[in-house]
Image (spheres, helix red, strand yellow):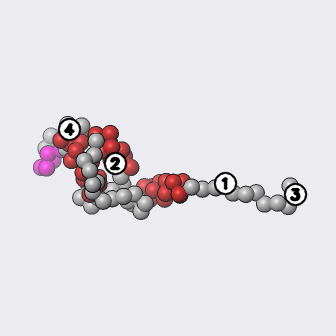
Amino acid sequence: MWGQKAIPPQLTVHDIAARLAQEAEQQCRPSPVLDHCAPREMLTEVQAHTVMQTHRACERWLCPRKASAWNLLVQAGRIVPRPANGSM
């Protein structure tokens, strides 16, 4: 009615975490809400692909979860790394 304030939409923990992750990515920073620890169990290819997407802003050598996903996808032939010397 008149004079009543609109009730803001209810945010879930997932909504807040997703927004924090998105803001960090836009600023090229690792997400403060993603789990960066090495996985306890072997990832599947689908999980590894998802990790690579959600950890885009992470450096492989600083994020054990992204490193695990990268290594699995390299072993599976889904990623072909460039030679260390830069030659093609």
Q: Secondary structure at mark 2?
A: helix
Question: Which badge, 4 or 3, comes first in the chain's sequence?
Answer: 3
Question: Which residue shows up at 78% across the image and 60% down it?
Answer: 5
Question: Which residue shows up at 33% across the image and 43% down it?
Answer: 47
Provide the major secondary structure of the magenta segment.
loop
Label 1: which residue? 9
In x, y percent, where is residue 8?
69, 57
Who is closer to the viewer here, 44 or 55?
A: 44
Kindly report the distance in space between the C-alpha atoms of the residues bearing marks 2 and 1.
30 Å
Picture disc at residue 2? 3
Label 2: which residue? 51
- Identity of the amino acid at label 3? Trp
Kindly report the distance in space between the C-alpha atoms of the residues bearing marks 4 and 2.
15 Å
User: Which quarter of the rendering shows the N terminus?
Assistant: bottom right
Which of the 4 quarters of the picture holds residue 61?
bottom left
Q: Secondary structure at mark 4?
A: loop
- Identity of the amino acid at label 4? Ala
Question: Which badge, 4 or 1, comes first in the chain's sequence?
Answer: 1
Q: What crowding class fits label 3: few (fewer than 14 Cα within 10 Å), some (14-19), or many (20 or more)?
A: few
Q: Which residues are magenta?
A: 82-86
Q: Is residue 48 left or right of residue 16?
A: left
Picture disc at residue 76? 4
- Identity of the amino acid at label 1? Pro
User: Which quarter of the rendering shows the C terminus?
Assistant: top left
In x, y percent, where is residue 29?
39, 60
